[in-house]
Image (cartoon, rainbow, N blue to C red):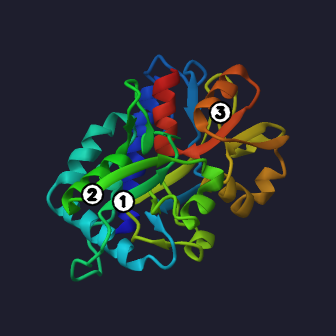
Amino acid sequence: MKLRKITVYLAGLVGLSLALAGCGNGDTGTPAEDESATPEEAKYLILDEAITTEQYGVGFRLADTTLRDLIEYTMVELYNNGTVEEIAKKYADQGINFDAYVLTETDVTEKPEWDGTTLIVGFDQDFPPYGYVDDSGSFAGFDLDMAAEVTKTLGWELKLVPINWDLKDAELNSGNIDCIWNGFTMTEERMSQYTFTKPYMDNTQVMVVRGNSGITTFADLEGKVVMAQANSAAYSALNDDHADLVATFAELRTIPEYNSAFLELDQGSVDAIAIDRPVALFQISKHS
């Protein structure tokens, strides 16, 4: 079931990414012969090759298994009553696809008891469409809306705390936040550092380049400058799973957030960005 959902998710988002870029069709990831637009004419191009596929979960301190179970149990309730689908529709034009949502059942058979009345959620405010500051200056995003509905269902207060992604471990372990809920990839290393809900979202890490760059495959990145968010899953995946590819880069740089990465791509100071696909789609729509 998970593999099927990943496939559906990718097919839908490829079509959306090409529509945002102004070229191509959603079946092949390349422009159709009778289309006037070409990759070179589009401002951005998402390469067909994926860096990695992954899943997001809500991360808690290792000892907070009861709180984790309660949040997971409530998320499944929201899936069953249609709330998750409504939130996904709200962010559909920003890259969120309901078919990618996979937390449809839980092994938690009874609703856990918890003494708290407030959930403090740590998130990266520069990670749209999962968490960001909208045009009105308010916090928005799929994950933040999910957290709001969970706390509403529980009758709790929600406190949103923007965090420096590099300092997320310190924020969580110090008690400044109760969980990390913001496109938090469940890597093997993190599984030993946090207690996670079951995965709730499938995701893919991709490369974005300028449409006129001439870069169409990973092989074309030889001698190029590639950028990723510091301590991100994309950065880890490149170093862990694509070390041979990284060795061909002129440089692999890091940056705190992706909006600035797209500005650097526009200016030509970097040649490619390694990034989560929905975040790429949001940024492409914003910068095109």
Q: CA distance from mark 1 to mark 2?
A: 7 Å
Say which mark, if any, is on residue 16.
Answer: none
Identify the image quadrant of residue 104.
bottom left
Report x, y in % for residue 236: 68, 58
Near mark 2 (Cα within 10 A), the count class, few <14, some 14-19 or many ≥20, is some
Q: Amino acid at mark 2?
A: Thr
Marks 1/2 in contact by CB < 8 Å: the verdict is: yes
Residue at position x 68%, y 36% in the image: 272
Report x, y in % for residue 243: 78, 59
Asked which secondary structure carries label 2, the reply is helix
Quadrant (top left, top right, bottom left, bottom right) of the N terminus:
bottom left
Q: Which residue is mark 3?
A: 261
Q: CA distance from mark 3 to mark 1?
A: 31 Å
Q: Amino acid at mark 1?
A: Leu
Q: Earlier in the sequence, mark 3 or mark 1?
A: 1
Report x, y in % for residue 128: 46, 39
Front position in the image: 155 or 168: 155
Q: CA distance from mark 3 to mark 2?
A: 33 Å
Report x, y in % for residue 184: 50, 58
Q: Which residue is mark 1?
A: 119
Near mark 1 (Cα within 10 A), the count class, few <14, some 14-19 or many ≥20, is many
Q: Earlier in the sequence, mark 3 or mark 2?
A: 2
Q: Which residue is mark 2?
A: 151
Q: Amino acid at mark 3?
A: Ala
Could one spot residue 182 in this view of the protein?
no
